[in-house]
Amino acid sequence: MKIGVALSGGGIRGIAHAGVLKALEDNQIKIDIIGGTSCGSIIAALYAIGYKPYYIYELFKKYAKQIAGTNTNPIIFGIQNFIMKNKFKGLKSGENIEDIFNKIANQKNIRNMKDVNMPLVIPTVDIMNSKEYIFTNYIPKKQSHIEQYITDVTIGKAVRASSSFPAVFSPCNIDMHAFMDGGVLNNVPVNEVKKQGADKVIAVKFDADPIDKKSNLMDIVMKTIDIMGSKISEENLEMSDIILNVYTDKVGLLDFKKLDTCYKYGYQCVINNIEKIKKIIE
């Protein structure tokens, strides 16, 4: 039996995925196939190229601020400029994500998606034609839309494309494509993990926080993305065998102070559901 895991996006909260993987590992649950969107793609790709969950956690902590900045204010101001003046002033290119990830992958002698041994799927969306594309190392058999799958790309570029959160990072240009966060159309890629041959799929997701008077512009953007992708996410989640909804206590998109807490939330979520998980996969 092949076990697959599908990891959702969620900004800084995505470090909880490392906690989920660590808890599964501690309970001798072997993962054969993995997929992830946006921040989930970072964790999924690191795991697929051979990094252990706790080391992924350490890597995430080490580079998170370098990728996104030390605080959210410059990004929030950048979003305001974009909305009010229709300019990209203040937005980040996302090149840091690509460069850092390629550097980490090279330490495992991996450069291209095709170099990865474990089946890996990373969704993204082309804003030019409003279509979903999948970065992967294995094109599923009997697919009528083979052009949807991209294998010849550096793993850093794939992660960057899937993580290009609207209004935070500029779109990632590859050939004629302009890719943005995969969460717009496929925030929990259960369907693609199943296509890779998974018999049982564990879906891991977060719920967007409710909007209130204390919410800032970043919270509103994140909630908007969640609403946009909610219907498709529901369809994907119905294909999973168990859904782990990780509680993160209103952790913001870029709330760096709560990295350790989120990791623990992910670990505890598995422990709380371990009997259900074992029953399903056994």
Image (spheres, rainbow, N blue to C red):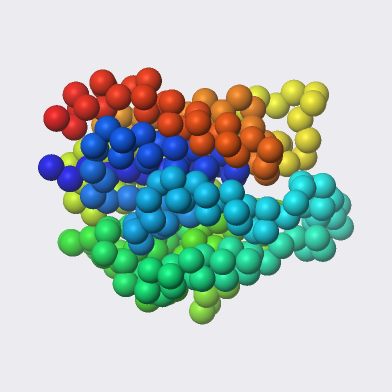
- Is residue 205 visible to the viewer in this orientation of the structure? no
Q: Position of residue 189 (x, y in %)?
A: 38, 46
Q: Where is residue 174 in the image (x, y as percent from the top left)?
A: 52, 75
- Say which quarter of the image contains residue 173: bottom right
Up the image or down, 272 lies above or below 10; here it is above
Residue at screen point 53% across, 54% down: 59
Q: In this view, does 70 lie to the left or right of 33?
A: right
Q: Where is residue 234 in the image (x, y as percent from the top left)?
A: 41, 33
* Residue situated in front as seen by the camera: 20 or 155: 20
Up the image or down, 257 lies above or below 41; here it is above
Q: Is residue 136 left or right of residue 18?
A: left
* Labels in figure, total: 0
Outermost residue, bottom direction? 175
Q: Where is residue 188 in the image (x, y as percent from the top left)?
A: 42, 42
* Residue situated in front as seen by the camera: 255 or 245: 255
* Residue situated in front as seen by the camera: 141 or 266: 266
* Residue situated in front as seen by the camera: 261 or 229: 261
Residue at screen point 27% across, 51% down: 33
Q: In this view, does 29 lie to the left or right of 228?
A: left
- Is residue 106 visible to the viewer in this orientation of the structure? yes
Q: In which quarter of the image is the C terminus?
A: top left
Up the image or down, 156 lies above or below 247; here it is below
Q: Quadrant of the N terminus?
A: top left
Up the image or down, 56 lies above or below 257; here it is below
Residue at screen point 37% across, 41% down: 21
Residue at screen point 80% across, 60% down: 90
